[in-house]
Image (cartoon, rainbow, N blue to C red):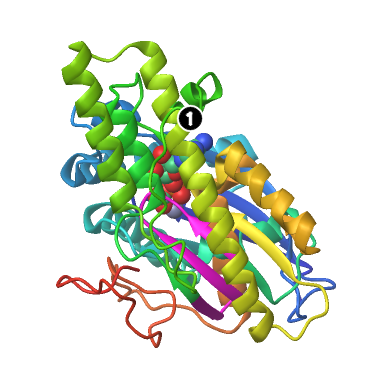
Amino acid sequence: MHKSIIALGIESSCDDTSIGIINVDLKDNLFTSQGLTSKKIGLVTVSQDKLHKEYGGVVPEIAARAHSERIDMCFKKVLEQSKVELDSIDIICVTAGPGLIGGLLSGVNFAKGLAFSTGKPLIGVNHLVGHALTPQMTNDLSYPYLILMASGGHCQYLAVCGANKIERLGTTIDDAPGEVFDKVAKMLNLPIFSGSEVEKYAKKGDKSRFSFPLPLVNKNDCDLSFSGLKSSVRRQVDYLAEKQSGLYVNDQKDICASFQEAMKLIFENKTKKALELFSKVSSEKEVSFSLAGGVAANETIRHSLKELCKELNVRFSAPPLDLCTDNGLMIAYAGAQVYLGGYEDSLGLSPRPRWPIDVDHQKPIGFGKRGRKV
Ligand code: KG4
Ligand code: ZN
């Protein structure tokens, strides 16, 4: 019997090609109520920010091509960095969805090639489950816990009761918050169209100068909405640009600060409601709350939710910033849990661009004609 297994995780669902390797300790934690003890061995992530910048958003065809051109190189580099031989890897985990089909195909085909040539088990991982389990990698966090997963494509409150037992308590009914951060950066023509840039500008801005709307905060559930906030920022930018024939740097900073403040208030309000709902699901005395996804890297939002938890006597944890954004380690970690739960995929594994984390959940309001928001 192995004392540990080495898991390889491949992530290519959006615009980061990332491959990580972890060692999972099997000694004391097989199928307890906790996550697994794991140790990072190596991680290589190549961002595509520069390739998409001039288009103001991720272009799926460019992303797909870049993933297929770089995935080999990432794999070679991560083996070199971690000094692990391909032979020593026990399982091959790959994001199979949800995400952009071209990128998913690059990752899944690469993983299938590896699994076929080595005979090692192949595990298709749900990207959202990867984010939802990430806080366990760095915190002593046992099931069940509540997590806010907020990224460029998703926003959900999830009751995580096990690796394959995740219940959605609330979701965005329109845009994802990271997507809105990116669009605000673009409207303001910041040097990089990303939430981290908005955060940088917000640090020096006046958050009380503009009062942006807080959609759905008066509703007594934990569904969220961001498109009204995005439109309101758009109108303010257009108004100032016309009135002054352009925007000043101070305007950019103040809009970033006021917008980020609105985001913070929405998350504070909705997290309170999600915690109320979660306390009905969880029978534990100590309630745990965690964060995941790229938006969780925002220090203002992190800090305010930490303070909220302190006030409500809820245990707070959040992954380090580099594990909040997309990475291969979270896929290796989630894949290891799936594998140890007795599941693996065949070489017939296909990508699932739409793969809701809990298929049985009722439709959120705003269920669009292209299907539910995942
Ligand atoms: O989880 P992630 O890496 O990829 C997706 O699965 O979407 O999240 C990326 C998103 C982007 O929209 C990015 O602008 C946002 O997370 N983000 C941030 C920050 N860092 C990344 N948003 C707000 N503040 C940040 N510091
Ligand atoms: Zn993600």
In screen coordinates, is 226 left or right of 264? left
Task: Tell me: residue 111, above or below residue 60.
Answer: below
Percent position of residue 82, x then y: 63, 40
In the rendered structure, does residue 288 fall within the stretch colored magenta? no
Q: Residue at x 23, y 46 (%)?
A: 64
Residue 155 falls in image quadrant: bottom left
> Which one is nearer the viewer's eye here, 73 or 213?
213
Numbered disc 1: secondary structure: helix
Task: Tell me: residue 93, above or below residue 213.
Answer: below
Q: Residue at x 70, y 83 (%)?
A: 282
Q: Residue at x 25, y 44 (%)?
A: 231
For badge 1, the amino acid type reads Ala
> Which one is nearer the viewer's eye here, 324 or 312?
312
Q: Residue at x 73, y 53 (%)?
A: 138
Percent position of residue 264, x then y: 53, 46
Residue 71 seen anywhere in this rendered image of the structure? no
What range of the chain is rendered magenta? 147-168
- Dot 1 surroundings within 10 Å: few (below 14), some, or many (20 or more)? many
In the rendered structure, does residue 165 fall within the stretch colored magenta? yes
Task: Tell me: residue 204, above or below residue 294.
Answer: above
> Which one is nearer the viewer's eye here, 67 or 2?
67
